[in-house]
Image (cartoon, helix red, strand yellow):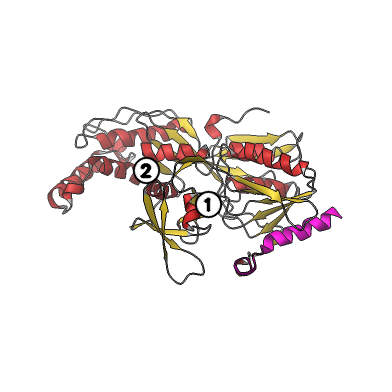
Amino acid sequence: MDKLEEAENRLQTGEIAQGDQKKKTRDFRNGIIVGVLTTALILIGAYAGKTAYQIAKIKGAAAEAASESVVNTETIQKIELLESVIDEAYYYDDKVSIDNLQEGVYKGLVAALGDPYSEYYTKEELEEVVNSNKGVSYGIGAYISLNKQWNMAMINNVMEESPAQEAGLQAGDVIIEVDGESTQGMSVSQVVSLVKGREGTTVRLTIYREGETDYLEIDAVRGKLIEATTVNSGMLEGTDHIGYVHIIEFDGVTVDQYTEAMAVLKEEGMKALVLDLRSNPGGDVNAVVEIARKILPKGMIVYTEDKYGNRKEYTCDGDKEFDLPLAVLVNDYSASASEILAGAIQDYKKGTLIGTTTYGKGIVQQIQRLEDGTAIKLTISAYYTPLGRNIHGIGITPDIELEYDYDAYQTEGKDNQVEKAIEILEEQMK
């Protein structure tokens, strides 16, 4: 099969693609904002396949052109007025940074789209995104995603023997503050940038945890750069060779880790498999497609369509189709790439989905890198399951709906969803 194009290989965090950028001027007062806002507009037009139009110079620009662009005389005058008021009246003037003000303008432009998945990245934030997509972490060793109910960042998993695990952080912990700074309204990448820091330093997280009467204050010591373990596996105890594979998220290291885990389970005589995608926030579409090719029959895995109807298909040749009974665990935090895999398995009736309705993220993001080292991530298309379902805002309803029994796990160590999967698989193995 053809390799996936570099320009369409990321979902949750998006892909890295080289974008065009016009020169930006040197001085904030004299128009640095104009240059960068113009760049963003040209990038959007260029990606869509349209000829990028040239924005008229502020002086002498036609009224019609100005009215159609964010960059016009009125906007520039308003920015200059705001800066003047800040200079004259802001009490904490010694803390004012021109760089921060500029970044605020760029971030504000993208935030005005009202799309929680579109974002402007500084150089530092982009580096963190790239490292995360490669499956490396520099910080406390925790996977962070978005809590839909709170609309705040949460920990969806912790790495084994990591600072996060040693500090007592748990999957499902909602991050209320980082070092006393509220995370309300922050994107996941912004929270991640606060959590990460120099090795050996301590970060304090204020956490909401279900079942606790008050917020928890947890200190974690930041560690070294480490490669993430995104796949956990083993044979389920007390069963007749039922394997278990938990994919935490889809990163650059995930395919090899999954392949190795499956090889070990097959050597141990696996007769059925529980594939756990619970709280998997997604990640690299290249990784999830490669894993889908080790499970699905010949045919479509997923396809995307942009606003012009341009379609991109990802297919499977069926040569490595999984031929044992399969159960897939999902919940309301199974999102994006994990929904691609779960949706395709359900469409082909290759396995039984158990749990609760998934997150419902059926759109694709692309990161376009700018020449100054920053980047812009934009939603560029929607994706569809093999049967043509777009699950955005809807999610995937499992074949067997079963709420997770949190109390049973806390008191008895029993996972009722895994137990249900075992029950289904044992019946199919007869």
Residue lying at the far right of the rendered structure: 430
Q: Quadrant of residue 78?
A: top left
Dot 2 alpha-carbon crowd within 10 angstroms: few under 14, some 14 to 19, many 20 or more: few
Q: At 14% from the left edge and 52% from the top edge, which residue is drawn? A: 89
Residue lying at the far left of the rendered structure: 88
Give the main secondary structure of the magenta stretch. Answer: helix
Q: Residue 198 — which label?
A: 2
Q: Quadrant of the C terminus?
A: bottom right
Mark-to-mark CA distance, 1 and 2: 19 Å
Q: Quadrant of the N terminus?
A: top right
| Residue 64 magenta | no
Confirm whether residue 66 shows in the render.
Answer: yes
Tell me where residue 346 appears, x and y as whole percent. Answer: 71, 50
Tell me where residue 280 appears, x and y as whole percent. Answer: 58, 50
Q: Nearer the viewer, residue 365 or 416?
A: 416
Q: Which residue is mark 1?
A: 158
Q: Which residues are magenta?
A: 408-430
Q: Is residue 350 left or right of residue 200?
A: right
